[in-house]
Image: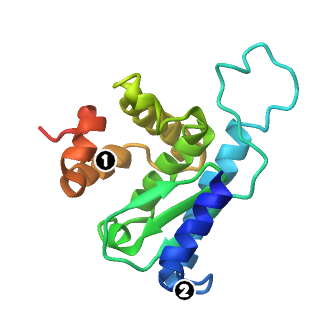
Amino acid sequence: MGNIMFEKIEEKRGPAILGPSDPNTVRVRQIASGIIRAAHDLFPRGDDDHDDKQETPERHDFKWEVVIVNDGKAKAYSLPNGKIVVYTGLLNCLKTDAEIAALIAHEAGHVVANHDMEFSRILPFFDTLAPQRNEMEADLIGLKLLAAAGFDTHVAHGVYETFGQIGGNWWSRFHPWCKKE
């Protein structure tokens, strides 16, 4: 499913996808490497039989990849095949490596939790709180990944507040715990 989705992104955004030697790509992939290592360590593949298998997110056998799109939109998302797509417009809002790590960790949290594999696109029609639960779960997994990768987890709240400012109602609706007081 993720490969098909990424093919559509490549068709639409192909010329805007930055190459592996672009400074933005190099920087974000370097930051992401620690988050991805943490995902492998904290959420192993899960091919042995454990009783708690249902309660623990598991990493599927795929190749993680961070893709940078040269576009002024402040946008990022993840795909179920381990691809994380980040737009340069959002990178421009995040100044430090720790802030970028918080973004990557949040998106990796969605992948680790299999949110796209849980029909999260359909589920909201039946359960209006599903997107909010998915975002909260991605935030919590993201914090674990940040800590395991050696980043300061306190930076995440500020990043989420930034997302709230640039994401408007959509972000606030699914992240009410991140509203700036």
For image coordinates 80% across by 32% down, the residue present is: 46
Residue 22 location in percent, x, y? Answer: 54, 86
Residue 115 sits in quarter = top right
Distance CA(mark 2)–CA(mark 1): 26 Å
Amino acid of disc 2: Asp
Q: Is residue 30 visible?
A: no
Q: Earlier in the sequence, mark 2 or mark 1?
A: 2
Residue 89 location in percent, x, y? Answer: 33, 72
The residue tagged with tag 1: helix, strand or loop? helix
For image coordinates 67% across by 59% down, the residue present is: 3
Q: Pointer 2 and pointer 1: residues touching (CB < 8 Å)?
A: no
Q: Which residue is mark 2?
A: 22
Amino acid of disc 1: Tyr
Query: Left of 28 or right of it: where is 44?
Result: right
- Within 10 Å of disc 1 (Cα), the crowding (few <14, some 14-19, many 20+) is many
For image coordinates 86% across by 32% down, the residue present is: 47
Residue 83 location in percent, x, y? Answer: 61, 59
Q: Which residue is mark 1?
A: 160
Query: Left of 56 or right of it: where is 151?
Result: left
Residue 119 sits in quarter = top right
Query: Left of 29 or right of it: where is 100?
Result: left
